[in-house]
Amino acid sequence: MDEKKKNVILIAGYYGFENVGDEAILSAMLADFRKQRPNLKFIVISSNLEKTIARHHVRSVHWKDIKGLLDAAHECDLVVLGGGGIFQDYWGVSAGTQLTQFHWGISYYSSIGLLANLYKKPFMIYSVGVGPLITEEGKRWTRLTFELADVATVRDSESKALLTSLGVPSKQIQLKPDPGLSLVLKVKDAIDILKAAGVFPRERPILGVCLRNWTEGEKSTTWKQELALALDQFLEKYNAQMVFIPFQVVEHELENDHAVALELIDMMSFKDRVHAITETFAPEVMGGLISRCHMLVGMRLHSLIFAASAGVPAMALAYDPKVHNFMKLLGLSEYALDLQTMNTQGLMSTLNAVWKQRTQIHEVLTQRGAEIRKLAQENTTLALDLLDGKVKHKKMAIAVESLRDQLIQQTINLTERDAHMDILTADIASMTADIASMTADIASMTADIASMTADIASMTAQGVIDKHQIDYLTWQVAYEQQLKNEVLSSRVYRLAHKLRELRLFLFPPGSSLERFIKWMIRKPREILTRLREAIRRHGFLNATLRGFAILGIRVSYPIKKTLYKRKYEGELRQLEQIIAKHQNFFDIFHVPMGWNTLLFQRFQHVSLQVAKMGGLALYGGHPTVDKDIFVYQEMQKNLFVFKATDNTVTNRILSALEKRKDQIVILRIQSIDLVTTAEDVQDFLRRGFKVVYEYIDEISTDITGNVPDLVHRRHEVLLNDERAIVVTTSDQLYEEVSEHRSQNFVLSTNGVDVDHWRIPKRNPPEDLKPALTTGRIIVGYHGALAKWIDYDLLHMIADEGSYELVLIGHEHDDELPKSGLKGHPHVHFLGSKSYFDLNTYAVYYDIAILPFRKSNLTEAVSPVKIFEYMAALKPIVSTDLRECKKYKSCLIAETSDEFMAQLKRATELRSNEEYLHILDTEAKENSWQAKTAEILKLAGVNL
């Protein structure tokens, strides 16, 4: 087949059923496909063709139209099944119904695999959820469908484990997150919708709640009552307001989220602070609604996915394993409660924990969000590789046993239907006989009436019937006929008849115009109902004011939308002009790590120094931490933070930089970047960018959690492609790189902004004062608190009695709580602090420590904190790490006893001028300015 013609993709899933989560998956899939290849055409299998076509601009075929499905499979070049949690059999499996109008659930989804196989089309299962699988039939057809797939990805490790247990080879299943994570959310629309629902963000913090119905009867009532009590307590404690956000609103009560919301509102006390959105919107807007909340309580999986994407802390109510699995993927499983076992106390405890830890959770989501989104988009790359023939298509015949079983079951089904038809035929024959009998009876009755009429006429002639009675009956008939004639000939009737004809002409039944008129009639009723409710809740004056506010929103919305587009395009053009006019080198860090993060890291420091040295620095911002960012924000001269979560913005910037052939364009990639692929690297090099790969840490799950394959593939490409520049931060990493290349690599450790850390003592932070008031020596550590910390050594320091141990940083895992140090009387754990506040703590250290265990991981790291300690002029005591041994200012200890001895020595060196001079010299030698200059020089920049 001509390669150019391979552009039709058939997509199947749970689409057209008015479920926001599944529509979000479809929207994200189509957006990713269209971004990578604009000329693709799509046929989507749906339950609602009209809405699917209008919403997604695709062709569509009904999921029960077997002829249509066959035609679509014949026409397409690739069949894609997914995503969503479609392989589950909560409600059983309809055996033997594949490729018939009676298929549903697993029998429907397995039909798609059969279609692809029958027409010999490439087949991909796209980031689905698997399980629970209860029936043998469900397990068998799930296994067969995955065996038919050329490429199969699942959205969580539990799905992969279940498939492996069914006999699907593990190597055939790839782990890729839910596509909904890559959906671009629409925030502006959401604000107007919230205000229209009576939610005003500036009044109180907003708690978003996304529920669905689950279980019936007493069990359903129990969990709702427990939740209602907890939500009331939360609203009271934190003076918050709450809004219910529905993801599915249909007639069936079990699938109507708004019905659940009304049930809970009825159970709650603080009804005046509770609001409910009554309808669903486009997935991007629904995600925008969640992004405006300060916190979320979510049952719907995609409400949690939207929250993660927007950096909104959430408590999950796990009604299905997929909810637990997603929270586990984020590393936040402690904030997921089982729906059937939760109680008010547990709910309130978890709500409190999420609220108090919301800053830390937001930081985790920000860091993980960009990584997971990029990983989710790899699904599209796999699909296109399959379409292009880069992945070999399986020429696999369906197992004879499976076909035999299918044929037997369908034969049984047809036999049962034939028997049922025989019964219906017999019933119809019986009814036909009954009708014939009734017809004969009516004919007989008609004859009887005619006979009776003749008799009456005869009797009348004979005077048997009273003449007055006959006159009365005759008059009554004439009167009724007269009334009928009067109605038909009246002006009112003639006018009404003409109006009806005019109505049918102007507003044909079923037309969009007729629906609009009905909406115009219905809407005032809704408004009056909401007005009465508003007056009941807020009083007449407040309700009137809110009404005018909402009216203003409705009227101004189209104007705002137009202004938004103009502003967006205007700022993009401004940024392109800034790039076009700059007359020096460029540096871009394109990953959305965010600028205003708690941890101000190497990537931000280098961007700052680039700007100071005359280059134009472009840094990937994230709207969850960079609140004021729209398209871009100028942080200082020559330093611009742009909205890197918006692919349009990133692509326009890269295109503008590509045009600047007259200047050096440096594009930096970090080894901990979980987003950029090897293919991206090749594209950057093709465009003429100077790719600088900063190899700052050993690639390990201990640092970043799950390390996707793309990181290892990219790492290998960058080490071996000598067009790229590799910057290593430690001797061990430098030695590794030297085995792969002979040029374009350098050792450049981490550094420090000396002026930031060299500050005078002022009023100490409140949470540090308890440690200072003891009069003991302050031993300080700031940084990650993780498994590589020697907690036994910290216990020894705290137990000694001469020191107050101050620990500042993020709890990377559960090792600190398990150590018991938090309860020690001489230990002060102060949690995470912003980089811009951390210096006000460090200035009060008497001694600074680096208590790392010795391992491959810690031997490869260049600890940025030792340079910060140097700049703050604090004596440094460290375990015998390779990178610390380089510096005279570091007092090295090989054992715990030596560490305690070095602490005493450090106490004496606090005011030693010679030692303080060493600290000052080594800090200045390792300034970020010097480190950045090393990198720029290797990239060919003349400073």
Image (spheres, grey):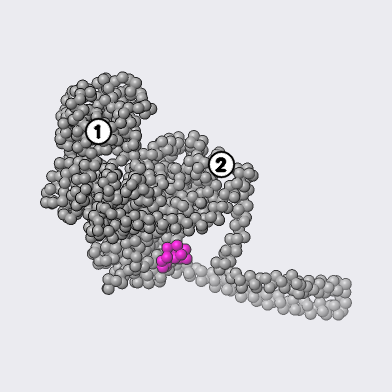
Mark in front: 2 vs 1: 1
Left or right, 470 with respect to 563, comes to right
Left or right, 722 with respect to 168, comes to left
Can residue 59 be seen from the camera position used here? yes
Q: Which residues are magenta?
A: 49-61
* Residue in the image at 53% along x and 48% along y: 195
The amino acid marked with disc number 2 is: Lys
**Of 851 and 765, which appears nearest the observer?**
765
- Secondary structure beneath dot 1 equals helix
Q: Which residue is mark 1?
A: 871
Residue 318 sits in quarter: top left
- Secondary structure beneath dot 2 equals helix
Please tell me how crowded label 1 is: few (under 14), some (14-19), or many (20+) other residues with Cα within 10 Å: many
Q: Quadrant of the N terminus?
A: bottom left
* Residue in the image at 30% along x and 54% along y: 582
* Residue in the image at 55% along x and 38% along y: 269
